[in-house]
Image (spheres, helix red, strand yellow):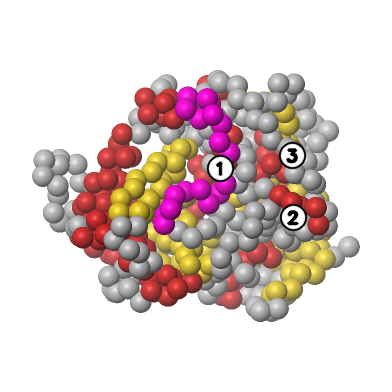
Amino acid sequence: MATQVTTKEKHLKVEIINKTYVKPQKPLGRKEYQLVTFDLPYIAFYYNQKLIIYKGGVEEFEETVEKLIDGLKVVLVEFHQLAGKLDKDDDGVFKVVYDDDMDGVEVFSAVAVDTASADLMDEEGTIKLKELVPYNGVLNMEGLHRPLLSIQITKLKDGLVLGCAFNHAILDGTSTWHFMSSWAQTCSGSKSISAVPFLDRTQARNTRVKLDLTPPAQTNGHSNGDTNGDANATQPPAPAPLREKIFKFSESAIDKVKEKVNANPPEGSTKPFSTFQSLSTHIWHAVTRARNLKPEDYTVFTVFADCRKRVDPPMPDRYFGNLIQAIFTVTAAGLLQANRPEFAASMIQKAIDMHDAKAIEARNKEWESNPIIFQYKDAGVNCVAVGSSPRFKVYDVDFGFGKPESVRSGANNRFDGMVYLYQGKSGGKSIDVEISLDASAMENLEKDKEFVIQE
């Protein structure tokens, strides 16, 4: 039965026309993978949502959906964890389990008859986008009885939207885009993928941690809307209204930011600040100004750093799972703003450089001795928290009907100060900065000529 969802404010009508489940194209038997210390802190985050907007693929929409499903069957042979479920062993240790009898990946096809790709490109926030991606407001813990990946393919007037909801307890951004690029490869005619995922998480950490958590009640109703009914018990109180906006930094703008931050290198410094460190400093300063903080107020900069090359022994880039840790830097707002940008950049650079195998091991041991389940917004007071990475080649995800027009994050896991960095569509060093802020702070940020660099 078709389900129609309407967002009155934006007049977006999405009709779900079909739902199916997709399994690997051949039997694999039963496979189990223990979740490790790098995975478990994210069990109380929400599903991680990504949206990719295309202009192609609409002429023969049914054939396009079939092609995407056929490619999905192929790629799931290697990425079969995404077709499984969360479970616990007899000792209460979380694991991801795949079995041929499981449903597999959930796939919706839908139509937004009155919407063109340009309508979505102009959308700054996520009100309209929420209807284009599954599992809004669904916690990762619900992977005990939900698919670990849900996909919605929505036909537009002149293209389509691919909306994916990934269970963040089993993979990070690197693994997400490894899967997406591999799926695109199979849909473009490749018989095999270029990088087979490395699936043994215990090679990165083999400590068994029991989490005494009560699983959430299974939600009812269509899974593509905000959860309701019994699921409300799993939801935290609604946060204050946020505004979301994408700030596009061209290659020349990035060069200007980097030049400014590197103009006065700290005494004794021999290592220039990277593009990431320079842009992070630029954002941290601007958001702190926009918030009108008192000089004595603390502000925290948080980055979710990829630890694949930092652990001992190093793990391959194709390691499938979470291999990230949050790195924190804190200072007083007055001190941040009274100093030149290299002050903040030095703190960020030092925190990242010091997060080596020894620091990672110490963090893991500390967490294992007292496991703390983070909420998605626990990134620090007055924080700027950076996720995703402009290194992910998101605009190369071509399923055979053209490169993306836009890549966005969904509404889940957003809070005041959350920043997502994406490769810019124009290529080169261009970067899209997707920021969520308190509405008044966002208004100030938009007017900040120092932040919004004029070309």
Contact, CB < 8 Å: mark 2 with mark 1? no
Q: Secondary structure at mark 2?
A: helix
Residue 230's place in the image compared with 179, above or below, is below
In the rendering, at what x and y percent does residue 273 appear? 24, 48
In whole angstroms, how far apart are the C-alphas of marks 3 and 1?
A: 16 Å
Q: What amino acid is labelled 2 in the image? A: Asn
Residue 285 or 15: which is nearer the viewer? Answer: 285
Residue carrying label 1:
374
Q: How many neighbours does mark 2 have within 10 angstroms: few (below 14), some (14-19), or many (20 or more)?
A: some
Residue of label 2: 232
In the image shown, does 449 or 375 lie closer to the viewer?
A: 375
Which quadrant would the N terminus be assigned to in this image? Answer: bottom right
Q: Residue at x 73, y 31 (%)?
A: 87
> Of helix, strand and loop, which one carries label 3?
loop
Contact between marks 3 and 2 (CB within 8 A): the answer is: no
Quarter that holds the C terminus: bottom left
N-terminal label among 2 and 1: 2
Alpha carbons under labels 3 and 2: distance apart: 13 Å
Is 381 in the magenta?
yes
- As drawn, the label of residue 215 is 3
Q: Position of residue 142 (x, y in %)?
A: 72, 44
3D distance between C-alphas at marks 2 and 1: 19 Å
Label 1 Cα crowd, 10 Å radius (few <14 / some 14-19 / many 20+): some
Give above or below for 55 relative to 29: below
Q: Main secondary structure of the magenta part?
A: loop
Q: Residue at x 27, y 70 (%)?
A: 450
Left or right of 180: which side holds 104? right
Picture coordinates of residue 99, whole percent (x, y): 78, 30
Task: Point out residue 53 in the picture as x, y percentages from the top left corner.
Answer: 58, 63
Part of the protein shown in magenta: 364-385
